[in-house]
Image: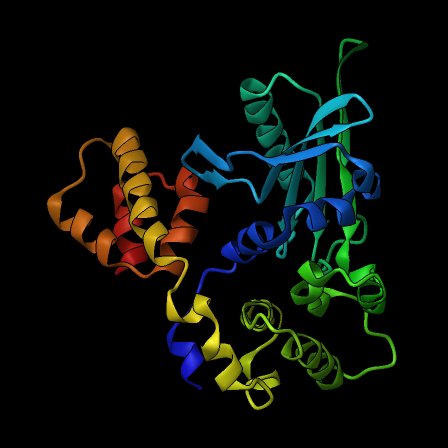
Amino acid sequence: MSYESRPQAYDETIRVLEQKDHRGIAEFILPAVKNADEITLGSAKLSIPDMREVDYLARVKLKQEDFVLHIEFESAYKSNTEMQKRMLRYYTYIKWHNDLPIYQVLVVLKKPPRLKNIVGSFKSTVQDMDVMQYQYKVIKAYEIDKYEVLKEKQVVLYPLRIFMKHEGESEEEHIQECLTVVEALPDSDYYFLLVECLKKLYEKGKYEKIVKEEIYMSSILYKEPYETGRREEKVKILIKFLGKRFGALPAELKKKIEETDTDKIDTMLDEVLDYDSLEEVKKYIQ
């Protein structure tokens, strides 16, 4: 299908939903926010090369208490240790720039295939001294009843229903039901974003025959790809960070990086600290 020729980065899906209804996302994560006096989106950009943006960041004023709400959506959970370190890095960066209490939430979209227990906390003790106790809330999207989202009319979450529990339905029935719900919405962007989530969760053979291409292509997100303007920024960050690690990059290598597809650029940014030499970089982009 033609929509496959216009791939978009999955990471952008959450930020597009955030722009559509940032309060709705916050209320889903923290129901008490329904009574908040104020919710103001914060800057999600980071100056950390291998951690480019947070998924959701907002300042909340609730019952005379000001705090920062930080949410991360994860579809490829690998290990507790890795995620704890990542969330802690986010916490320290946010705290450095916002001298407010921080309420952190991790939303795990896909059930980890080999991990039995997701842990959102750790305690560090040295010589019998409690050095640190760190914790964030964990929400498992795959354990949420997708029909509760419909019942509450949480439209901003409709694209994410594909990750939610679908007992008594086959995968095809589940996919069809989720598509049918967003198809009825006047804003075709939700259809587009659901398909982006489908790409992350299923192989194309599972859904390509039932996706309505005309609706997908009618979205402004298809007509004006939302990743285009961000690609150049990512390339610049990657080149800059590689330059700091290994010295000035050869012009030929810079050119190859600039011509590398967006998915590979994203992977390189995530793994940039793992490279031991520019030779490894060259091998990856060949």
For image coordinates 75% across by 34% down, the residue present is 136
* Residue name at image x 32 percent, y 45 percent: 233
Q: Which colour scheme is used?
A: rainbow
Q: Count of labels shown?
A: 0
Residue 268 location (% of width, % of height): 39, 49
Name of the residue lying farthest toward the bottom = 209
Residue 160: x and y in percent read 68, 63
Residue 159 in which image quadrant = bottom right
Rendering coords of residue 99 (x, y %): 62, 16
Percent x, y for residue 65? Answer: 77, 22
Q: Is residue 40 above or below residue 169?
A: above
Asked if residue 119 can be seen in this view, the reply is: no
Kindly give the residue lying farthest to the left in the view shown.
251
Q: In which quarter of the image is residue 222?
A: bottom left
* Vertical relation: 107 (above or below) 44: below
Residue 168 visible somewhere in the drawing:
yes
The residue lying toward the viewer, choosing from 98 and 128, is 98
Give the left or right position of residue 78, taking residue 111 as reference: left
Relative vertical location of residue 248 with respect to residue 220 in this rendering, above or below: above
Apparent side of residue 23 relative to residue 229 in the rendered image (left or right)? right
Q: Quadrant of residue 63?
A: top right
* Relative horizontal placement of residue 220, taking residue 190 as reference (left or right): left
Q: Nearer the viewer, residue 242 or 158?
A: 158
Report the quarter where the C terminus lies.
Answer: bottom left
171 horizontally vs 145: left or right: left
* Residue 37 against residue 29 in the figure, above or below: above
Q: In which quarter of the image is the N terminus?
A: bottom left
Front one among 124 and 219: 219
Question: In front here: 215 or 161?
Answer: 215
